Amino acid sequence: MFVSISTTGTAENPASDLGFLLHKHPDKVQRFATAHGTAHVFYPEAGEQACTAALLLEIDPTALLRQGRGKGRSGSPDLALAQYVNDRPYAASSLLAVALRTVYRSAMKGECAHRPELPGRALPLRIALPAVPVAGGDGPGLVERLFAPLGWQVDARPVPLDESFPEWGDSRYVRLELTGTLRLADALQHLYVLLPVLDGSKHYWVAPDEVDKLLAAGQGWLADHPERALIIRRYLSRRWSLTRLATERLALARLAEADDREAEEIDNAVPDVPDVPDAPETADSADTADATTVTATAEEVNVTRSTGPTGPTGPTGPITAVAETAGAAEGGRERGESLAAQRRTAILAALARTGAARVLDLGCGQGELVGALLKEPRVTEVLGVDVSSLALTIAARRLRLDRLPERQARRVKLVQGALTYTDARLKGYDAAVLCEVIEHLDLPRLPALEYAVFGAARPGAVVVTTPNAEYNVRWETLPAGHKRHDDHRFEWSRAEFAAWTEQVAADYGYTVELEPVGPVDPEVGAPTQLAHFRLAEPDAAGPATTEPDAAGPAVTGTPSHDHAPEGSAHR
């Protein structure tokens, strides 16, 4: 198993600097033990004008077999057919990728203590691999699709089964030569990920930590790669659970990068609780918060920041617990239906008036509203969208999506996405719901959400609920001047909300009606305010306003997201 890395240089930047980057002296032949054999590193040439570093990996196929490698779902077809006669010592595979990571670990990380300026420099590189197995047919074509988007010029020539008998055709191996001007660290990361992808199998057990290795090696290029789904699936040996995990984490990383935040800050839509029930909770248990053991519902508090599973607390107790029950707001009246349940009732009634059959729940959280929508015979399809993979996982378990009959399962889908980016998946629906979502966005980001929902997705109706800030004085345990939750970036008065809804309706060709939700106080109104938007002209082409100029990033597993002037939403 052999790979060579070559570069050229000048008197000012000699090619022999490759030795500093690889941390291997050009005048020495070095040997390294790897998990599956012995790696030898040597330099066929090392001068000012040209330098080549070669890695030769010796594999003992018999020992590999006896260790149990190559069996099961991650095994190689060669080992399955011929246990003691196979291509493992010669063809570049996952074993060579492991050797690259072992021998060139510092170079792969972009570290060079002696010459710290070198790792950031792009070099003219040529990488040669005499035999690369390519699974699935169309070997040169697949190699081109994988490496060309990364800046490589690809020369992949099929190896004939037997040169003496050309009529036998080509084998599944190619002679591969890559040329391009890249950082050496990037080149090694590409090889580390894509060699196992080309081979289509790994010759060791694929554990969950392989997801971490993939995302680390793919940082900066995997998220934008046109063959991203194939790369993830093959690298993880088609283990669907790991593939799903990697896809979710990659999407979250993209959203965090676009929002200039840490991924943990964005994927915090639910408290970090140790156990999640498989079955849906009843309305009482899901919607009513207890004064001593608080579990905030997704609709009232969809984002919990470093507050622990009990939510934020005020001087006299948990704020969220008070904000969730309408009865408590009446100052002594017996506790009645929770405010979250009243919101859902109001939303369902608004949707019923439109006759909506295909509904978007934007910022679906743990799926309470999705579950309610599925109980409506009129509703034929529900798409729940949330930025939090944790929230979506909890929603899927509570809704028992894996146990639903096929007919029912076709009615619902949960996907990850940020609401401040346009998304082709959201187009064509009868109605969309933004239940307690907008207040979790910074105000400068709100126009991006407006365009993504009202301009790009453009459903026939949109239902929006948000807290009424005037009503906060009626919460006995909410300190004066505080918002109902730490993550609320704003809370509007009735006049402020009305002004916003009128502006959005005018900008995007909707009409709007406002209604209170919850007990109405004669002085400060109801605790929740609801806006029901309807397209004024359903056949209209789109909004009269100018589209935002900036483009948002693509999210894993989705079409490209466009026109995103600001970062991602929290829901």
Image (spheres, rainbow, N blue to C red):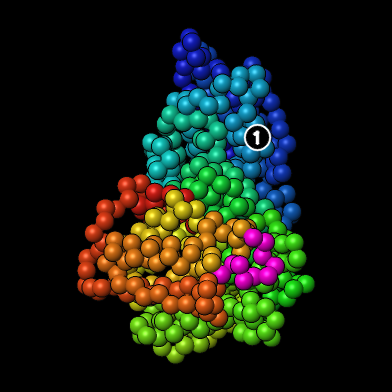
Name the residue located 47 percent from the left edge and 26 percent from the top edge.
122
| Dot 1 crowding, Cα within 10 Å, few <14, some 14–19, many 20+ | some
Instruction: Looking at the picture, tell me which residue is in the foreground, 21 or 417.
Output: 417
- What's the residue at 60%, 22% (across, down)? 116
Is 472 part of what is drawn in magenta?
Answer: yes
Secondary structure, mark 1, is: helix
Dominant SS of magenta comes to loop
Q: Residue at x 50, y 42 (%)?
A: 220
On screen, residue 467 versus residue 486, left or right, reads left
* Range covered by the magenta-colored residues: 471-480
- Three-letter code for the amino acid on which mark 1 is drawn: Arg
Residue 326 on image: x %, y %: 61, 79
Instruction: Provide residue 502's location: percent of width, then percent of height.
Output: 34, 65
* Residue 124 makes an appearance in the image: yes
Q: Residue furthest right?
A: 292
Q: Where is residue 118 drawn, in percent x and y?
A: 55, 22
Rendered view: 565 above or below 182 = below
On whether residue 469 falls in the magenta region, the answer is no
| Foreground residue among 98 and 20 | 20
Name the residue nearer the viewer: 217 or 79.
Answer: 217
- Name the residue beneath numbered marker 1: 105
- Residue 193 is situated, as x and y percent measured from the top left of the image, at 55, 46
Quarter of the image that includes the N terminus: top right
